[in-house]
Amino acid sequence: MFNVKRAATLIGAASLALSLSACMTPHSYVDAKLGDTDYSTLKKSATPQAVQLLVEFQTKGVANARATEYVRSHVYEQVSQSGLFSQVSYSPVASGRKLSILINNVPLSDNAAAKGFGVGLTFGLVGTMITDGYECTASYVEPGHDAVTKVVKHAIYTTIGNTSGPEGLKSMPLQQASDTALRQLVAKSLAELDDSTDISR
């Protein structure tokens, strides 16, 4: 026979589990300072040249091969779409031109692991926000000229548990936030290099 009391208990337990699950779901927010760069505004050249692209991703200053493998194709696509170069190659090019993109992920929140553990102990009722900093160091080398280097910084905020994100920023999954921050970092770096070098010559 259908047990109404048991059913109510199960529904209550399921509702609690769902609410706790929602509380524990991370929500990420991309800092608004950089925004998106419109490649059509770059100076560019009437006769763009080929360039060798070097890409590396680091975590706290240490090379991260797995992350490098992931971001390399994304960076390659962006540099190609920028219109600054006639060809983008991972191998050396005849002109000797090189573009190096180094991205370093540096957590800006103290003891992020302990914060996450604390949120878990309270089942998400007490929340926290963790800030991840990203630094993109872009260097352009053209034979016969001094290397030009630009450093662009960015940040992603991630909330866990019962807490609000930064005011005015859109919540998104962490992977989407990471891809967005990467795109904005690289685009801004290319724009700054374009303003400071002879790429557009």
Image (tube, grey):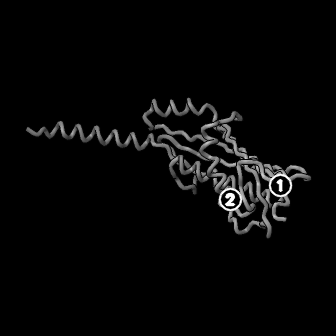
Residue at (14%, 40%) from the top-left corner? 4
Say which element carries label 1.
loop
Q: Position of residue 86 (x, y in %)?
A: 74, 62
Residue 23 as seen in the image, left or right of residue 77: left
Rendered-image quadrant of the C terminus: bottom right
Residue at (57%, 54%) from the top-left corner? 167
Amino acid, disc 1: Ser
Judging depth in this view, the residue of 19 and 132 nearest the camera is 132
Say which element carries label 2.
helix
Residue at (71%, 35%) from the top-left corner? 61
Q: Residues within 10 Å of mark 1 (few under 14, many from 20)?
A: few
Residue at (88%, 52%) from the top-left corner? 143
Q: Position of residue 11 (x, y in %)?
A: 25, 41
Cα separation between marks 1 and 2: 17 Å
**Of pointers 1 and 2, the one earlier in the residue sequence:** 2
User: What residue is pinned by disc 2?
Assistant: 80
Q: Position of residue 135 (x, y in %)?
A: 71, 45
Residue 163 in view: yes
Q: Nearer the viewer, mark 1 or mark 2?
A: 1
Q: Which mark is residue 95?
A: 1
Residue 143 as seen in the image, left or right of residue 41: right
Residue 150 in view: no
Amino acid, disc 2: Ser
Q: Position of residue 181 (x, y in %)?
A: 63, 51
